[in-house]
Image (tube, helix red, strand yellow):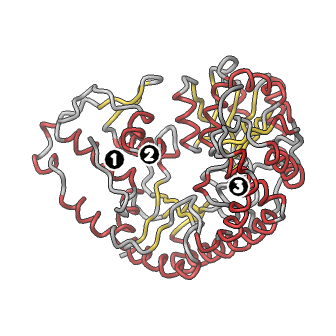
Amino acid sequence: MFLLNNKNNTPLYTQLYKQIKEEILSGNLKPFSKLPSSRRLSNDLQISRNTVEMAYQQLYSEGYITSKQRSGYFIENLDLSILPQESIAPKTETIDVIKECENIKYDFQYGNLDPTKLPISEWQKISNKCFRQYKSELGKYNLIPGELGLRKEIVKYLRDYRDVRCNVDQIIVESGIHSSFNIICQLIKKDVSDIAIEEPGFFAARNTFENYGLEVCPIELDRCGLNVKKLNVTKARAVYVTPSYQFPTGIIMPISRRLELVEWANKSDSLIIEDDYSCHLRYNIKPIPSIQSLSGERVIHLGSFSKYLFPSIRVSYMVLPEKLVNRFYSIFENFPSSVPFIIQKTLQHFMEEGYWDSYIRKTIRDQKRKHDALVHTLDKEFGDKITILAKNAGLHIVVQVKWNMKEDELIKRAYKAGVKVYPTSVLWDCKKSHEHGAVMMGFGAIQIEHIPKAVKLLKKAWLA
């Protein structure tokens, strides 16, 4: 059994990765033995499946485990006899690093938000009002599509901000994007055996598709995003894209490429799964209309409130094409909603009373200031020694160094200096070996006054 410490500043996936690695090197995990599925291990350890998958992906990239299509992960057949005994035993250096990580000062975790900027008092006021107003509803299960009032607000919001055209029956409220992936797989598995994804791309999408037995086809990116010419030569009947802000490269798919993608879907009778997760977070560029606005019958449109408003409440939504609506209701007709009733009603009133619009505007201003401060400080401290990718939108940037230092060394040195940065290698399906490492730096949660101090520490750690 693996033991993880939530109070330890070392990421949970790193703790799990190190413990599995030690079990392999010590011989406790035998060659060819199968690791628990990510679902089972996440349940056993009470952690997210993403955390398990990140640990597995790191082990896979280092060659300790291998992946078999539709079967899972297995221990590689390693000849441990050639290793010196001290390399098999747990290293004290690992313990030292963990101790130093307990003093982490600055965390560039992607996806988190600064709690001091969240509309806690407004949300609490509306939530209390909903508890009083909807007493009779609190003893019931709400059905899977979500509360009608909230879905009506989402329809209006999508029409005004994303030019999405849909009716309320096409809106499905879900508990996070991962829940949406699970439902999509169940909706399309009769018609789709091969699905294309961006390379690199969002690992949770890739892993979910594989877990449902779909053949995943990674498609390389060019300067406009997913390469449709390469998509055309695959057997894929569905494609997952993040066109508003490609994850993790930050490429924004231009209208010409979006039209190419729609043409591919029309000619091949296929589906586009459009993840519009970061549509609002534009800092120096104007937003582009959604792909759904170009072809509603070919697009499953996904969105989330988590990148802006309380990630912990886990509220997302899907817009299904009309041809999938009946199939959805036939499969999930009597299922309860995965989002609690009181959260849905609070969000509904938050939108109805105008808080959402004003909060979005404020959030964009705040995040732009942090984005600009981070980019400016990195340029000032490192100059032409680095390349900054994924600028001008979203909640993260990618820093590619130009000296000979790999990702794991960059992360390790940053840890020791009291700064947490994150790997990009887990986002590649086909692992590539790069002499020059790259790390992800999320800025959603860090306070703007901490950015110069954190970057100075990185400079000292990386260039010393």
Residue extending farthest top = 190
Q: Earlier in the sequence, mark 3 or mark 1?
A: 1
Q: Amino acid at mark 1?
A: Tyr
Q: Is residue 11 left or right of residue 197?
A: left
Check residue 266 in the rendering and tell me which mark sits there, or answer none. Answer: none
C-alpha gap between disc 3 and disc 1: 30 Å
C-alpha gap between disc 1 and disc 2: 8 Å
Q: Earlier in the sequence, mark 1 or mark 2?
A: 1
In the rendered image, the vertical position of residue 82 relative to residue 371, given as above or below:
above
Contact check, label 1 and label 2, Cβ < 8 Å:
yes
- In depth, the one of 4 and 381 nearer the eye is 4
Q: Amino acid at mark 3?
A: Ser
Secondary structure at numbered mark 2: helix
Check residue 54 in the rendering and tell me which mark sits there, or answer none. Answer: 2
In the rendered image, the vertical position of residue 163 relative to residue 399, given as above or below:
above
Q: Is residue 80 left or right of residue 177?
A: left
Query: In the figure, residue 53 lies in which quadrant?
Result: top left
Q: Which residue is mark 3?
A: 278
Residue extending farthest left = 85
Image location of residue 193, percent across then percent down: 63, 20
Q: Is residue 83 left or right of residue 123?
A: left
- In depth, the one of 112 and 23 nearer the eye is 112
Q: Amino acid at mark 2?
A: Met
